[in-house]
Structure formats: C-alpha cells, structure tokens
Image (spheres, rainbow, N blue to C red):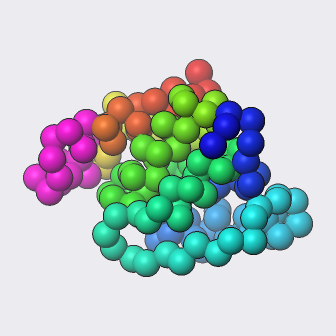
C-alpha cells in the first residue's frame, strides 16, 4: 500500500477488558459520525495470532490510536497489533497516537511496573526474538509524542 493511500481514517488498538466499559466505549459514537472506513467487516476470533484482515486494516488506516492500559502488553494480540502499527509508522509514514490509560509512560517505555511482570511471563512463553520486537515496539510508541 502506498504511503499516501488509506481506506480507514482510524484504527483503534486497545485491551478490551481494561477499557471497553470506559474509554473505548465512547469512541463508538465517533466512528459512526466522524470517521470514514471501508465497509469490509473483519471477523475477530479470540486467541491465536491476528489474521491477515486485521493486518490489512492496520496498513490501510491513516491514523492508529494505541490505548496503552495496565494489561495491554499481556495480550499477544495487542502486542502483534502494536508491532504492525509501528512498522506502518516507519514504512508507510502512518500517524500513531498513544494514549496512556492508567499507566505511566515511563512504565511503557522501560517495561517496568506491571509491564515488567508481563514481560517476565512472555519471556517464558514466546521466543526471545518475538519478545524483543514487542519490547522495541512499546519503547517506540512511548516516545512518539516526544
């Protein structure tokens, strides 16, 4: 996909249990009145890796809003989304807006606090290469506004 082309205005990446009943529930109205997106529906299935449809939606979004919450990094799905979002920022020059929801930016940037506990678990479950890519994506997104 070319640098200046997109089919969606905004892609929202969030950890549902942390934000669904508070912050992200407000965005449903925004999407219906203010943002353009293709009519393609992406079927989401819990667990496992994210599918090609979701990766395509990330690539085709002009802006990605990443809501970094206490348990965001505990989700493999969220971390895979973030890795793709940051790749699109570098290669397709997409805009990324981090939102720090009930977490300190330094905990995200340095993977301390709850993020340290999460990555201790990830290191046992996933390969070192994968964990290092996730760590790099978190560090990168935490510096976006600086």
Residue at point 58%, 41% (across, down) = 98
The spot of residue 79 in percent (x, y) is: 39, 51
Q: Residue 121 vs residue 52: left or right?
A: left
Which residue occupies the extreme left position in the image? 124
Q: In this view, does 60 lie to the left or right of 131?
A: right
| Residue closest to the far right | 33
Q: Quadrant of residue 48?
A: bottom left
Q: Can residue 69 be seen in this view?
A: no
Depth order, front residue of 91/135: 91
The quarter of the picture where the C terminus appears is top right
Look at the image and tell me whether residue 120 can be seen: yes
Q: Which residue lies at the image location 87% right of the left edge and 60% below the top edge?
A: 34
Q: Which residue is drawn at 32% across and 46% down?
A: 115
Q: Nearer the viewer, residue 51 or 73?
A: 51
Q: Does the magenta stretch include residue 54?
A: no
Residue range in magenta is 116-132
Classify 74 as above or below 108: below
**Is residue 123 shown in magenta?**
yes
Residue 124 image position (x, y, % from top left): 10, 52
Along the line of sight, the residue nearer the viewer: 67 or 42 = 42
Left or right placement of residue 70 versus residue 135 in this view: right
Q: Considering the image in quadrants, where does the N terminus appear? A: top right
x and y percent of residue 86 in the render? 50, 37
Q: Quadrant of residue 125?
A: bottom left
The one nearer the camera, 91 or 78, is 91
In terms of secondary structure, what is the magenta stretch mainly? helix
Mark count: 0
Q: Residue at (74%, 42%) from the top-left corner?
A: 5
The picture places residue 142, in percent across and down from the top left corner, at 49, 33
């Amino acid at each position: 996909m070319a640098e200046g082309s997109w089919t969606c205005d905004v892609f929202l990446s969030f950890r549902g249990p942390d934000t669904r009943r508070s912050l992200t529930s407000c965005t449903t109205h925004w999407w219906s009145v203010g943002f353009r997106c293709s009519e393609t529906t992406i079927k989401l299935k819990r667990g496992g890796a994210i599918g090609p449809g979701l990766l395509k939606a990330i690539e085709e979004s002009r802006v990605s809003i990443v809501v970094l919450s206490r348990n965001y990094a505990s989700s493999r799905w969220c971390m895979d989304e973030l890795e793709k979002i940051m790749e699109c920022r570098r290669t397709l020059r997409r805009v990324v807006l981090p939102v720090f929801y009930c977490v300190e930016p330094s905990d995200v940037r340095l993977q301390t606090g709850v993020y340290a506990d999460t990555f201790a678990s990830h290191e046992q479950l996933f390969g070192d290469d994968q964990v290092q890519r996730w760590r790099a994506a978190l560090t990168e997104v935490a510096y976006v506004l600086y």
